Amino acid sequence: MNEKEKRDLGLAYDANFNEDLLKERQKAEELCFRFNSLSPTEEGAKRAVLEALIPGYPKSATILSPFIADYGYNVSIGEGSFINHGAYLMDCAPISIGSHVFIGPNLGAYTAIHPLDIESRNKGLEKAKPIVIEDDVWIASDVTILPGAKIGHGSVIGAKSLVSGEIPPNVLAYGNPVRVIKPIDQDKHWDEAE
């Protein structure tokens, strides 16, 4: 079993010294560099780079630069989703972003888990767990999402939150660590807000 297969099974794998994975990350880094170097007016060129980086990148999605992904191919983004400036998607495991998801500036979504012991860490070993962000989620600015997290449909994550574990659907959650504050009544509209 090669290192990529181990990674994809959630096993410990050589993330730092394996030549094949290093080449894949270098390819993604080059694409991110190109995307981030283009003028905001070069919309067609920017979209072409994102389509090369992220398989199935939808026409109705928007990502603002700067943007970084470790592999790109482990990211999926749904229709109508928006990712603001400064996002870093450490997609060693899949990062699934649903449709109509709005992400504020400076998102950090990290799938990698590093060992606590020095010897394993110095060997370049790590594991990775996927992140799932379901449809219609709003993530405010400066949010950190940890390996294995899942944010349920329609939920809102407040600014500067640290998200781990599972956030249920249709709740407001924030804090470090994140905690559910209250349910969201989807039948109560903006003009009826408290």
Image (spheres, rainbow, N blue to C red):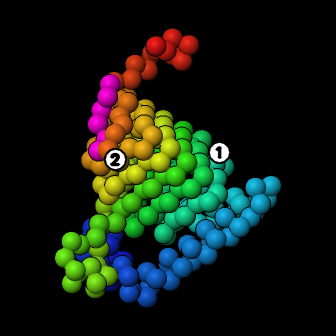
- Dot in front, 2 or 1: 2
Task: Give the residue type at disc 1.
Answer: Ser
Residue at the spot of label 2: 163
Predominant secondary structure in magenta?
Answer: strand
Numbered label attached to residue 88? none
- Residue located at (60% from left, 52% from top): 85
Q: Position of residue 72 (x, y in %)?
A: 52, 65
Residue at the spot of label 1: 60
- Residue located at (44% from left, 64% from top): 90
Question: Which one is in front, 67 or 7?
Answer: 67
Q: In the picture, which quadrant includes the N terminus?
A: bottom left
User: Is the residue marked by circle 2 packed among few (<14), some (14-19), or many (20+) residues within 10 Å?
Assistant: many
- Residue located at (52% from left, 52% from top): 106
Q: In which quarter of the image is residue 4?
A: bottom left
User: Is the residue marked by circle 1 packed among few (<14), some (14-19), or many (20+) residues within 10 Å?
Assistant: few
Q: Range of the magenta residues?
A: 177-182
Dot 2: what SS? strand
Q: 25 above or below 131?
A: below
Q: 74 above or below 29?
A: above
Q: Can residue 150 be seen in this view?
A: no
